[in-house]
Image (cartoon, grey):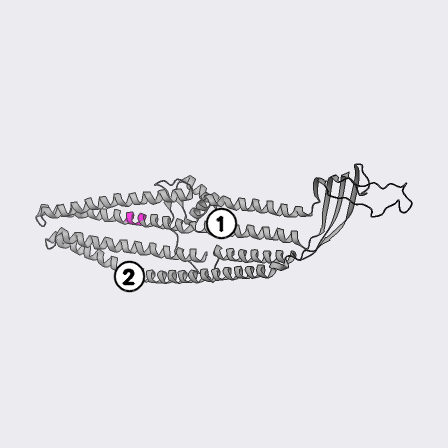
Amino acid sequence: MLLSALCALGQAQTLTLEECYDLARANYPQVRRLQLIERTRACNLDNAAKGWLPQLSLSGKAQLQSDVTKLPIDLRQLGLGSISIPTPDKDQYALSLDLNQTIYDGGAIRSSKDLAGKQADVEREQTEVSLYGLRERVNEFYFSILLLDEKLRLHHYYMDNLRLAAERIAACVQHGTAVESDAWAVEAEQASAERTQVELKGMRAAYVQMLSLLIGKELGAETELVRPTANFAETVDNNRPELSLFRAQEAHIDARQKQLDTALRPKLGLFASGSYGRPGLNLFERDFNFYGVIGARLTWNFSQLYTRRSDRRLLDIQRETVAADRETFQLNNDLDAANHRSAIKRISDQISYDDRIIRLRADLTKARANKLQLGTATATDLMRDMNDEQTARLDKAYHELQLLQAVYRLKYTKNQ
């Protein structure tokens, strides 16, 4: 879709509303967050998975003790005075290389990976909600340009009629059925129409510039915005990204709940330690030497029970908060949808009368022009009828654009 939008711009011919959606999304700086979120997710999952790798650490110590181990036996009283048992030094040193390997972690690593993924899902959906809001801004600029295009088209029609009226009144003045002031009145109306045309073109240029900035592409005066159709078959589905965000937030809370459960499970691992120091495993050995230890370790931390009830209560409160936010959003969304449906019906009813009003106003204008030729009407009367006809045509154009906007507001509300 984005490629087709770029191709359409490259030809500088037409541009659709859907292409503007894609271009605005691609141009919006926040869209880069989606890639950053996925990169962050990959890093967090990789880090969590490395919890199964052997954990290697190097440590050293030097300490001076106030006392050391001694035998509470006087060997001389036992007649063993010739035997000497060395006393360990009070200063001790050790340099150790420790290796720990997790065998069973109670699901802690798996829950950490799941939590990292769910957190990334929440951040992604938050970004999608922000990006979805671009559509409303695109709609505002796009339909404003379409309305101005329609006003300019009708204004050209009105100026052509003014030109014909000026020629007709000039002929009437020559034949004595109209006075010079009638020609001045038409000339003044033509000047006012030209000023209005300049104003409309300036407004269109401003909206085109804003739309260009939003989609990141320069739109020229020759670029035509395709008018969308008002055909829309509404379904019961609501595909707004906010609902996906609520689901992601609930899944994130569930992942945190699982992490609380895994914290209560025992952990089993293997360990090995190689050291060089004094004393070694033999406390009475006074020389530096190498020694090692290998074994298995089971740990079961019950301290999580202290805060478990409060932690679960906090998670329940967060679930209720998400549920309240969803209900609030759905209520407001349903109210918006009902308002747009009502607007669609109301405007459709108005449009059904517009053609009749335009036809009657056009007939009055023709009748007034004939009376002007006969000298029974003035140019002021003709200008008034022409303005009424122009207003009726503008009303229809405005109502048609209003109907389109109401339809696309409903589509935006339901993301359909």
Magenta segment, prevailing SS (helix, strand or loop): helix
Is residue 272 shown to the viewer in this render?
Answer: yes
Q: Which residue is mark 1?
A: 127
**Residue 68 as seen in the image, left or right of residue 309:** right
**Type of the residue with mark 1:** Thr
**Type of the residue with mark 2:** Tyr
Mark 2 neighbour class, 10 Å CA radius: few under 14, some 14 to 19, many 20 or more: few
Magenta stretch bounds = 148-153
Q: Earlier in the sequence, mark 1 or mark 2?
A: 1
Q: Position of residue 21 (x, y in %)?
A: 44, 48
The verdict on residue 288 being magenta is: no
**Residue 72 as seen in the image, left or right of residue 22:** right
The verdict on residue 151 being magenta is: yes
The answer to which image quadrant residue 163 occupies is: top left
As drawn, 76 above or below 400: above
Q: Which residue is mark 2?
A: 353
Say which mark, if any, is on residue 267: none
**Residue 301 as seen in the image, left or right of residue 408:** right
The secondary element bearing badge 1 is classed as helix
Residue pictured at 35% horizontal, 57% vertical: 403
Residue pictured at 27% horizontal, 49% vertical: 154
Residue pictured at 31% horizontal, 49% vertical: 150
